Amino acid sequence: MVSELLLLDKSYTGTIQVSKYTLMPTITNPLTLASHANPYPHYRALRDLAALGYDPELQLWIASSAEVVQAILSSEVFVVRPPAEKIPSNIRSGNAAEVFGYLVRMNEGVQHHIPKQVLLTSLRSINFSQHQSAAKELFQGLAGNFPLQSSAHINAWQMAFPVSLVAHLCGFSDDDLAQVVDWTHDFVSCLSPLSTNEQIQNAHAAARELQTCFMELLQTSTASPLSFLAGLQAEAGTKGWHNSDATIANLIGLLSQTYEATAGLIGNSIVNLHTQPQLREQLVAQPERITDFIAEVVRYDPPVQNTRRFVTQDIEIAGQHLRAGEAVLLLLAAANRDPQVNQDPETFQLQRDDRCSFTFSHARHQCPGQALAFSMTALALSHVISHSTAEQWQGLEWQYRPSLNGRIPLFREAYIPEGK
């Protein structure tokens, strides 16, 4: 998950086992690459070394080619959570654990098939144009709270705007949005294996508050027939899904995914506009190309760099024998730049025929919120482009938040002058 933080291990000296008898040194710890200044040469080296290799120090299989990543994401042999640990051990009891246990993106089995379809259909059916005016008004209000005049403003804004907009679509009042953002922040903080006891307790408290508020919304959302929540309830009724606890848990899950993944997409889009100023010029001249730009950011510099899968039964794949109980680290960012699926993958291209990206997963675990993430990012970038010029970005600097799999820039100086 995006929020699983990692203390970077500078002493890492791992190796990749590419056959039964051969150990070869890796370029760097693959778990640190998400927050690396430029991880992509390392991903290429790992992919050239082995499409699927084993790191005995990390005790992980490392999958880096598009073919292998796609095969694993498509196979029912590989699951999202270890079968013996469906809920992370550090949050095994409490409200946060209740939420996690219902998340369809973190669970397998036929009991989660209908909920998954309900969420997918409901998210895809959002008519964003119906909410465009309200979203722009909300955006302007947030821009007023975070005027993008300092690193603190832009960092807070890129996290707050996506969650606020999703909360708005769910029916929260404008007065409640800041509190929802805070609760989401606290909930997400427990998802790291390095979370402190205080963070875990705060996460349970935040989950409890969100559960209460969403229950109230579910009971009143029929009064707003165009709301996302009303549409979800109608779809759930059609499919015969009547578990309000599971519904609420997955709405909280939607907020938590939005909080970091969409923030990373917005931030990485800003980084690529800055490092490639010709792209800004193209978008100013052709604003309708902004969706193409976002799609290429998703492939070229994705906010989610890797994900894990766990083997449920012995299987042969890419010439390697994987045993039940083993774990695989899927380097999505490496697969996105595999020349076997994307021609000239190291260049950023607005126009790509048959663009291939694994950032929003693939097949049965395809993320249902992709279209919504694109819409929110497009709105955010349109605002940034219209309120700044390339010259005003010359001093922009950033680093990346330490994370196991999320690539979220942390800006560290002002770059849009006051009054813009």
Image (cartoon, rainbow, N blue to C red):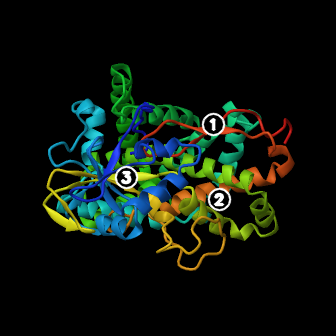
- Picture quarter with the N terminus: top left
Which of discs 3 and 2 lies nearer the camera? The answer is 3
Q: Quadrant of residue 376?
A: bottom right
Q: Circle 3 sits on which residue?
A: 307
Q: Quadrant of residue 67?
A: bottom left
Check residue 378 in the rendering and tell me which mark sits there, or answer none: 2
Q: Circle 1 sits on which residue?
A: 155
Element marked by disc 2: helix
- x and y percentages locating residue 40 in the rendered image: 54, 54
Which of discs 1 and 2 lies nearer the camera? The answer is 1
Circle 1 Cα neighbour tier, 10 Å, few/some/many (<14 / 14–19 / ≥20): some
Check residue 129 in the rendering and tell me which mark sits there, or answer none: none
Circle 3 Cα neighbour tier, 10 Å, few/some/many (<14 / 14–19 / ≥20): some
**Side (left or right) of 415 relative to 271:** right
Query: Measured along the vertical axis of the image, is residue 141 above or below residue 48?
Result: above
The answer for how far apart the CA atoms under marks 1 and 2 are is 17 Å
Q: Are marks 1 and 2 in contact (CB under 8 Å)?
A: no
Kind of residue at disc 2: Ala
